[in-house]
Structures are given as C-alpha cells and as structure tokens.
C-alpha cells in the first residue's frame, strides 16, 4: 500500500481549466446539425465548439458518457466520436480519428458560413 502512495502525485493543478488541458484549441461555431447514435437514432444538436480532436454540442436529450456517436459536419459528412462527458444538455466528445488539418479548415469555413442562433439560448 505504501508503494502505491509513493507513486501517486501529491499535488493537483487546480488552476488548469478544461480548455487548458485539451490537446488543441477549440473553435467557436454555433452550428445547428444532427448527431446519430449507433442504433441510427438522430437528434438535433447545436455544435458549440470543435477542434481536430473533439467537439461540444448542446442537445435536448441526454447522451451517456461512453456512447459512440456520429456528428454530421459540413464537407465531411458523418464523423464518429466517443462521448467523454455529458452534463445538463451538453455533450463533449472525442473523434475516433482526428480530422486532418486541410479537411478541418474546409469544414470550419463551411460551418462558420452556416451558423445560426439555437432556440435553446
């Protein structure tokens, strides 16, 4: 037991926010789109922010942590991701395969051209 205690960190960086812990910076988009589960059920979501590695959406339902989803993105079609957190109508997910930089830039330009307000506020 004491060997385990010796290997655990003694301090936690409480100043680091979720955004600081991400692998890449997120881009704000505000894009209404669709998200699908493995059983082909689709739901309307608002894509709030995105990076080459993941995204956050707002939804009316509750998609549980660990769920594999497909997010409809402009120019890319449906992209698979795993939900890493879900809280109060917000979902954070990590893409199964990161989006390459050229495809990401094309998608982001198209998403920004289509962005709208979401009725959820």
Image (cartoon, grey):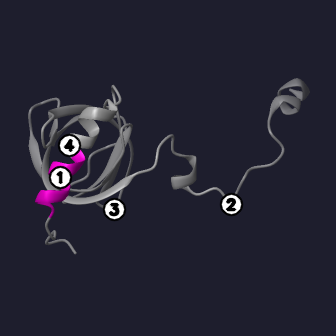
Disc 1 crowd, CA 10 A, few/some/many (<14, 14-19, 20+): many
Kindly report which numbered mark, 4 or 3, lies closer to the viewer in this rendering: 4
Please name the predominant secondary structure of the magenta segment in the image: helix
Q: Earlier in the sequence, mark 3 or mark 2?
A: 2
Distance between mark 3 and mark 2 Cα atoms:
24 Å
Q: Mark 4 points at which residue?
A: 107
Kindly report which numbered mark, 4 or 2, lies closer to the viewer in this rendering: 4
Kindly report which numbered mark, 1 or 3, lies closer to the viewer in this rendering: 1
Distance between mark 1 and mark 2 Cα atoms:
32 Å
Q: Image quadrant for the N terminus?
A: top right
Residue occupying the point 64% across, 56% down: 16
Could you tell me which secondary element the residue under label 4 belongs to?
helix
Residue occupying the point 36% across, 44% down: 51
Q: Image quadrant for the C terminus?
A: bottom left
Q: Which x, y percent locates residue 12?
A: 74, 50
Residue occupying the point 33% across, 62% down: 88
Q: Name the residue under label 1.
A: 111
Q: Going by the image, does 104 lie left or right of 119?
A: right
Q: Which x, y percent locates residue 45?
A: 17, 55
Q: Are marks 3 and 2 in contact (CB under 8 Å)?
A: no
Could you tell me which secondary element the residue under label 1 belongs to?
helix
Q: Mark 3 points at which residue?
A: 88
Q: Going by the image, does 77 lie left or right of 66?
A: left
Does the segment drawn in magenta span residue 92? no
Instruction: Please report the bounds of the magenta region as a residue range.
Output: 108-115
């Amino acid at each position: 037991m004491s060997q385990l205690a010796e290997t655990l960190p003694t301090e936690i960086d409480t100043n680091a926010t979720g955004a600081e812990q991400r692998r890449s910076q997120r881009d704000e988009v505000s894009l209404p789109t669709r998200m699908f589960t493995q059983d082909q059920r689709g739901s309307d979501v608002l894509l709030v922010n995105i990076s080459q590695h993941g995204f956050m959406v707002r939804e009316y339902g509750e998609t549980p942590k660990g769920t594999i989803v497909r997010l409809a993105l402009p120019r890319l079609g449906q992209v698979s991701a795993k939900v890493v957190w879900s809280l109060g109508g917000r979902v954070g997910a990590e893409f199964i395969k990161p989006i390459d930089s050229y495809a990401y830039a094309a998608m982001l330009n198209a998403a920004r051209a289509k962005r709208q307000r979401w009725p959820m506020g």
